[in-house]
Image (cartoon, helix red, strand yellow):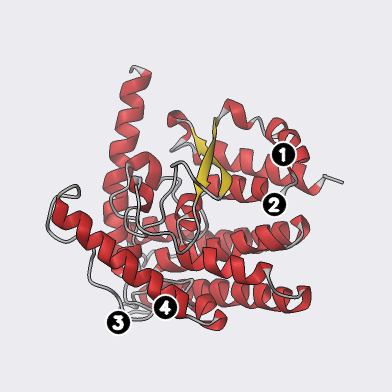
Amino acid sequence: MPKRVRIALILVVLLVLNSVALLLTFGPSQGGGEALADPRGDDPPNAPAAIENRRRHVQSHIADVASEPVPMLIQNLIDTSAWFSPAGLSGQEMAQRCWHVVLGNRRCSRLSEELAAMPPHERDTLLEEAFRTTFGMHQDTFDRALTSYETPGAPKNEQSALATQLGVCCSLFLIAEHRELDELLDRIDAVQRFGEEVRNRIKSSEAIPPAVQFVANAHVEPDNAFYISVVLDAVPAQQRDQLIAAADLNGVGTLKEIELTTWNAEPGTFDSVHAWQGLPVDRTGGTETKTAFEWDGERLMDHERQQDVVQQLLAAARALK
Protein backbone atom coordinates (compact mmCIF):
# COMPACT_ATOMS: atom_id res chain seq x y z
CA MET A 1 0.00 0.00 0.00
CA PRO A 2 1.47 3.40 -0.96
CA LYS A 3 2.72 5.54 1.92
CA ARG A 4 0.26 8.35 1.16
CA VAL A 5 -2.70 5.94 1.29
CA ARG A 6 -1.52 4.45 4.59
CA ILE A 7 -1.26 7.90 6.16
CA ALA A 8 -4.72 8.86 4.90
CA LEU A 9 -6.22 5.70 6.40
CA ILE A 10 -4.50 6.39 9.72
CA LEU A 11 -5.97 9.90 9.84
CA VAL A 12 -9.47 8.61 9.06
CA VAL A 13 -9.20 6.07 11.88
CA LEU A 14 -8.02 8.78 14.27
CA LEU A 15 -10.95 11.02 13.42
CA VAL A 16 -13.50 8.21 13.89
CA LEU A 17 -12.01 7.03 17.17
CA ASN A 18 -11.73 10.56 18.48
CA SER A 19 -15.38 11.24 17.66
CA VAL A 20 -16.30 8.23 19.79
CA ALA A 21 -13.93 9.39 22.53
CA LEU A 22 -15.42 12.87 22.73
CA LEU A 23 -18.92 11.42 22.97
CA LEU A 24 -17.92 9.06 25.76
CA THR A 25 -15.35 11.20 27.53
CA PHE A 26 -16.37 10.86 31.14
CA GLY A 27 -19.04 13.80 31.09
CA PRO A 28 -20.36 16.69 33.23
CA SER A 29 -18.48 19.90 33.99
CA GLN A 30 -16.28 19.91 37.07
CA GLY A 31 -14.27 23.07 36.60
CA GLY A 32 -14.17 26.24 34.58
CA GLY A 33 -17.50 27.52 35.91
CA GLU A 34 -20.75 27.26 33.98
CA ALA A 35 -20.45 25.63 30.57
CA LEU A 36 -20.85 28.17 27.80
CA ALA A 37 -23.08 27.62 24.81
CA ASP A 38 -21.17 26.03 21.97
CA PRO A 39 -19.57 28.96 20.10
CA ARG A 40 -19.53 27.09 16.83
CA GLY A 41 -23.30 27.37 16.44
CA ASP A 42 -25.06 25.94 13.39
CA ASP A 43 -23.45 28.14 10.75
CA PRO A 44 -20.56 27.01 8.51
CA PRO A 45 -17.24 27.82 10.26
CA ASN A 46 -16.30 30.58 7.82
CA ALA A 47 -19.74 32.18 7.63
CA PRO A 48 -19.82 35.81 8.89
CA ALA A 49 -22.33 34.89 11.62
CA ALA A 50 -20.12 32.05 12.88
CA ILE A 51 -17.02 34.25 12.89
CA GLU A 52 -18.83 36.98 14.81
CA ASN A 53 -20.22 34.41 17.25
CA ARG A 54 -16.72 33.14 17.99
CA ARG A 55 -15.44 36.68 18.36
CA ARG A 56 -18.09 37.47 20.97
CA HIS A 57 -17.26 34.32 22.90
CA VAL A 58 -13.56 35.15 22.81
CA GLN A 59 -14.17 38.65 24.13
CA SER A 60 -16.39 37.27 26.90
CA HIS A 61 -13.75 34.69 27.76
CA ILE A 62 -11.01 37.34 27.92
CA ALA A 63 -13.13 39.32 30.38
CA ASP A 64 -13.67 36.21 32.52
CA VAL A 65 -9.98 35.31 32.58
CA ALA A 66 -9.01 38.90 33.42
CA SER A 67 -11.36 38.94 36.42
CA GLU A 68 -10.28 35.65 38.00
CA PRO A 69 -7.97 35.74 41.05
CA VAL A 70 -5.01 33.37 40.97
CA PRO A 71 -6.67 30.58 43.05
CA MET A 72 -9.58 30.55 40.59
CA LEU A 73 -7.20 30.51 37.62
CA ILE A 74 -5.66 27.36 39.08
CA GLN A 75 -9.02 25.71 39.77
CA ASN A 76 -10.26 26.55 36.29
CA LEU A 77 -7.28 25.04 34.49
CA ILE A 78 -9.68 22.11 34.24
CA ASP A 79 -12.17 23.62 31.83
CA THR A 80 -15.11 21.58 30.53
CA SER A 81 -17.02 24.40 28.87
CA ALA A 82 -18.12 23.56 25.35
CA TRP A 83 -16.01 26.17 23.68
CA PHE A 84 -12.80 24.79 25.16
CA SER A 85 -13.25 21.46 23.39
CA PRO A 86 -10.68 21.01 20.61
CA ALA A 87 -13.37 19.67 18.29
CA GLY A 88 -12.76 20.45 14.66
CA LEU A 89 -9.15 19.30 14.66
CA SER A 90 -7.84 17.15 11.86
CA GLY A 91 -6.87 13.57 12.67
CA GLN A 92 -3.18 14.45 12.72
CA GLU A 93 -3.74 17.39 15.06
CA MET A 94 -5.99 15.39 17.38
CA ALA A 95 -3.35 12.69 17.81
CA GLN A 96 -0.91 15.26 19.21
CA ARG A 97 -3.12 18.09 20.38
CA CYS A 98 -2.06 18.63 24.01
CA TRP A 99 0.86 21.02 23.48
CA HIS A 100 -1.03 23.14 20.97
CA VAL A 101 -4.11 23.36 23.18
CA VAL A 102 -2.03 24.40 26.20
CA LEU A 103 -0.28 27.11 24.19
CA GLY A 104 -3.72 28.34 23.14
CA ASN A 105 -5.08 28.43 26.69
CA ARG A 106 -5.54 32.06 27.73
CA ARG A 107 -6.11 31.13 31.36
CA CYS A 108 -2.86 29.16 31.53
CA SER A 109 -1.03 32.00 29.78
CA ARG A 110 -2.29 34.59 32.24
CA LEU A 111 -1.43 32.36 35.20
CA SER A 112 2.11 31.97 33.85
CA GLU A 113 2.39 35.74 33.62
CA GLU A 114 1.20 36.13 37.23
CA LEU A 115 3.64 33.48 38.47
CA ALA A 116 6.58 35.16 36.75
CA ALA A 117 5.94 38.35 38.74
CA MET A 118 5.79 36.61 42.14
CA PRO A 119 8.53 36.08 44.74
CA PRO A 120 10.07 32.60 44.31
CA HIS A 121 8.60 31.11 47.49
CA GLU A 122 5.05 32.19 46.64
CA ARG A 123 5.47 31.03 43.04
CA ASP A 124 6.72 27.59 44.11
CA THR A 125 3.78 27.15 46.48
CA LEU A 126 1.26 27.96 43.76
CA LEU A 127 2.96 25.70 41.21
CA GLU A 128 2.71 22.85 43.70
CA GLU A 129 -0.95 23.69 44.26
CA ALA A 130 -1.63 23.76 40.50
CA PHE A 131 -0.13 20.31 39.97
CA ARG A 132 -1.76 18.84 43.07
CA THR A 133 -5.17 20.24 42.04
CA THR A 134 -5.13 19.14 38.40
CA PHE A 135 -3.45 15.77 38.90
CA GLY A 136 -5.60 15.01 41.94
CA MET A 137 -8.80 15.71 40.00
CA HIS A 138 -7.47 13.64 37.10
CA GLN A 139 -6.79 10.66 39.36
CA ASP A 140 -10.19 11.00 41.03
CA THR A 141 -11.94 11.21 37.66
CA PHE A 142 -10.48 7.90 36.52
CA ASP A 143 -11.03 6.13 39.82
CA ARG A 144 -14.71 7.09 40.06
CA ALA A 145 -15.44 6.39 36.40
CA LEU A 146 -13.72 3.00 36.27
CA THR A 147 -15.12 1.94 39.65
CA SER A 148 -18.64 2.59 38.36
CA TYR A 149 -18.05 0.07 35.55
CA GLU A 150 -16.36 -2.46 37.82
CA THR A 151 -19.22 -2.40 40.36
CA PRO A 152 -22.22 -4.50 39.22
CA GLY A 153 -25.43 -2.47 39.05
CA ALA A 154 -23.75 0.83 39.89
CA PRO A 155 -24.79 3.94 37.93
CA LYS A 156 -22.13 4.90 35.42
CA ASN A 157 -20.09 7.82 36.73
CA GLU A 158 -19.27 10.16 33.86
CA GLN A 159 -16.52 12.74 34.17
CA SER A 160 -14.51 14.83 31.73
CA ALA A 161 -11.25 12.94 31.30
CA LEU A 162 -10.27 15.18 28.39
CA ALA A 163 -10.63 18.26 30.60
CA THR A 164 -8.55 16.82 33.43
CA GLN A 165 -5.94 15.53 30.98
CA LEU A 166 -5.50 19.03 29.57
CA GLY A 167 -5.48 20.49 33.09
CA VAL A 168 -2.53 18.24 33.97
CA CYS A 169 -0.83 19.36 30.75
CA CYS A 170 -1.25 22.99 31.82
CA SER A 171 0.33 22.36 35.22
CA LEU A 172 3.28 20.53 33.62
CA PHE A 173 3.73 23.43 31.21
CA LEU A 174 3.81 25.89 34.13
CA ILE A 175 6.45 23.79 35.89
CA ALA A 176 8.53 23.74 32.70
CA GLU A 177 8.27 27.52 32.51
CA HIS A 178 9.05 28.37 36.12
CA ARG A 179 10.89 25.50 37.83
CA GLU A 180 13.98 23.36 37.34
CA LEU A 181 14.10 20.55 34.78
CA ASP A 182 14.46 17.88 37.49
CA GLU A 183 11.11 18.84 39.00
CA LEU A 184 9.39 18.62 35.63
CA LEU A 185 10.89 15.17 35.04
CA ASP A 186 9.72 14.00 38.48
CA ARG A 187 6.18 15.18 37.76
CA ILE A 188 6.20 13.47 34.37
CA ASP A 189 7.30 10.25 36.11
CA ALA A 190 4.31 10.53 38.47
CA VAL A 191 1.89 11.02 35.57
CA GLN A 192 3.38 8.11 33.63
CA ARG A 193 3.18 5.81 36.67
CA PHE A 194 -0.48 6.69 37.06
CA GLY A 195 -1.06 5.98 33.37
CA GLU A 196 0.51 2.54 33.76
CA GLU A 197 -1.65 1.83 36.82
CA VAL A 198 -4.82 2.70 34.90
CA ARG A 199 -3.81 0.61 31.89
CA ASN A 200 -3.09 -2.39 34.12
CA ARG A 201 -6.43 -1.90 35.87
CA ILE A 202 -8.24 -1.88 32.53
CA LYS A 203 -6.43 -5.01 31.32
CA SER A 204 -7.42 -6.92 34.46
CA SER A 205 -11.13 -6.00 34.23
CA GLU A 206 -13.68 -7.64 31.94
CA ALA A 207 -16.39 -5.17 32.98
CA ILE A 208 -15.04 -2.11 31.17
CA PRO A 209 -16.41 -1.84 27.60
CA PRO A 210 -13.93 -1.47 24.71
CA ALA A 211 -15.09 2.07 23.89
CA VAL A 212 -14.48 3.17 27.49
CA GLN A 213 -11.10 1.44 27.43
CA PHE A 214 -10.20 3.49 24.37
CA VAL A 215 -11.23 6.75 26.05
CA ALA A 216 -9.29 5.90 29.20
CA ASN A 217 -6.14 4.94 27.30
CA ALA A 218 -6.37 8.06 25.13
CA HIS A 219 -6.79 10.51 28.01
CA VAL A 220 -4.99 9.04 31.01
CA GLU A 221 -1.70 10.73 30.01
CA PRO A 222 -0.70 13.65 27.80
CA ASP A 223 0.05 12.57 24.25
CA ASN A 224 3.66 11.63 23.53
CA ALA A 225 4.31 14.72 21.41
CA PHE A 226 3.44 16.84 24.46
CA TYR A 227 6.08 15.13 26.59
CA ILE A 228 8.71 15.94 23.98
CA SER A 229 7.63 19.55 23.52
CA VAL A 230 7.37 20.33 27.23
CA VAL A 231 10.82 18.87 28.00
CA LEU A 232 12.40 20.82 25.14
CA ASP A 233 10.70 23.94 26.53
CA ALA A 234 12.28 23.39 29.94
CA VAL A 235 15.81 22.87 28.62
CA PRO A 236 18.18 25.80 27.98
CA ALA A 237 18.49 26.55 24.28
CA GLN A 238 22.16 25.55 24.16
CA GLN A 239 21.29 22.01 25.36
CA ARG A 240 18.22 21.48 23.18
CA ASP A 241 20.16 20.21 20.17
CA GLN A 242 21.81 17.62 22.40
CA LEU A 243 18.41 16.19 23.37
CA ILE A 244 17.10 16.34 19.81
CA ALA A 245 20.06 14.27 18.65
CA ALA A 246 19.88 11.83 21.58
CA ALA A 247 16.27 10.92 20.77
CA ASP A 248 16.69 11.26 16.97
CA LEU A 249 13.68 13.58 16.87
CA ASN A 250 14.43 14.74 13.35
CA GLY A 251 14.16 11.14 12.19
CA VAL A 252 10.63 10.60 13.52
CA GLY A 253 8.96 13.98 13.30
CA THR A 254 9.17 17.71 12.75
CA LEU A 255 10.05 20.61 15.02
CA LYS A 256 7.99 23.73 14.35
CA GLU A 257 8.17 27.23 15.74
CA ILE A 258 4.86 28.71 16.89
CA GLU A 259 4.43 32.43 17.53
CA LEU A 260 2.19 33.28 20.44
CA THR A 261 0.46 36.49 21.40
CA THR A 262 -0.56 37.68 24.87
CA TRP A 263 -3.41 36.03 26.76
CA ASN A 264 -5.60 39.13 26.36
CA ALA A 265 -4.95 39.61 22.64
CA GLU A 266 -8.05 40.47 20.68
CA PRO A 267 -9.54 37.77 18.45
CA GLY A 268 -7.48 37.45 15.31
CA THR A 269 -6.59 34.89 12.69
CA PHE A 270 -7.04 31.39 14.08
CA ASP A 271 -5.73 28.05 12.99
CA SER A 272 -7.96 25.02 13.51
CA VAL A 273 -6.31 24.04 16.79
CA HIS A 274 -7.17 27.33 18.47
CA ALA A 275 -10.42 28.25 16.74
CA TRP A 276 -12.54 27.82 19.85
CA GLN A 277 -10.15 29.14 22.50
CA GLY A 278 -9.41 32.20 20.42
CA LEU A 279 -5.68 32.67 20.95
CA PRO A 280 -4.13 33.90 17.69
CA VAL A 281 -1.07 31.91 16.63
CA ASP A 282 1.24 31.52 13.64
CA ARG A 283 0.97 35.16 12.70
CA THR A 284 3.33 38.10 12.63
CA GLY A 285 3.62 40.29 15.68
CA GLY A 286 3.86 37.43 18.17
CA THR A 287 5.40 38.19 21.55
CA GLU A 288 6.99 34.77 22.12
CA THR A 289 8.00 31.71 20.13
CA LYS A 290 7.58 28.11 21.29
CA THR A 291 8.89 24.91 19.72
CA ALA A 292 6.32 22.23 18.97
CA PHE A 293 7.22 18.65 18.08
CA GLU A 294 4.90 16.74 15.72
CA TRP A 295 5.19 13.10 14.68
CA ASP A 296 5.44 12.31 11.02
CA GLY A 297 2.43 10.60 9.44
CA GLU A 298 3.65 7.02 9.78
CA ARG A 299 4.39 7.47 13.51
CA LEU A 300 0.92 8.72 14.49
CA MET A 301 -0.36 5.26 15.40
CA ASP A 302 3.00 3.72 16.29
CA HIS A 303 2.64 4.22 20.05
CA GLU A 304 5.35 1.72 20.92
CA ARG A 305 7.91 3.63 18.85
CA GLN A 306 6.64 6.93 20.26
CA GLN A 307 7.13 5.70 23.81
CA ASP A 308 10.66 4.52 23.01
CA VAL A 309 11.51 7.99 21.69
CA VAL A 310 10.00 9.67 24.76
CA GLN A 311 11.96 7.44 27.13
CA GLN A 312 15.19 8.16 25.22
CA LEU A 313 14.50 11.88 25.53
CA LEU A 314 13.69 11.68 29.25
CA ALA A 315 16.85 9.66 29.94
CA ALA A 316 18.96 12.15 28.01
CA ALA A 317 17.32 15.04 29.88
CA ARG A 318 18.10 13.46 33.24
CA ALA A 319 21.73 13.03 32.17
CA LEU A 320 22.18 16.73 31.43
CA LYS A 321 24.58 18.52 33.74
- Is 3 placed above or below 78 here? above
The three-letter amino acid code for the residue at tag 1 is Arg
Note whether residue 150 is visible: no
Question: Any mark on residue 240, and which?
Answer: 1
The three-letter amino acid code for the residue at tag 4 is Gly
Sequence-first tag of 3 and 4: 4
Separation of disc 3 and disc 4 at Cα? 22 Å
Read off the residue under disc 3: 155
Q: Which residue lies at the image location 50% right of the left edge and 50% below the top edge?
A: 260
Q: Where is residue 47 drawn, in percent x and y?
A: 14, 49
Secondary structure of the residue carrying numbered label 3: loop
Label 4: how many residues lie within 10 Å, few (<14), some (14-19) or many (20+)? many
- Of the residues tagged 3 and 1, which is closer to the observer? 1
- In the figure, is residue 15 to the left or right of 314? left
Read off the residue under disc 2: 234
- Of the residues tagged 2 and 3, which is closer to the observer? 2
Q: Nearer the viewer, residue 45 or 231?
A: 45
Separation of disc 1 and disc 2 at Cα? 9 Å
Question: Any mark on residue 273, and which?
Answer: none
Separation of disc 3 and disc 1 at Cα? 49 Å
Sequence-first tag of 2 and 3: 3
Secondary structure of the residue carrying numbered label 2: helix
Instruction: Spot the residue most to the top.
Output: 2
The three-letter amino acid code for the residue at tag 2 is Ala
Secondary structure of the residue carrying numbered label 1: helix
Q: Where is residue 15 drawn, in percent x and y?
A: 29, 45
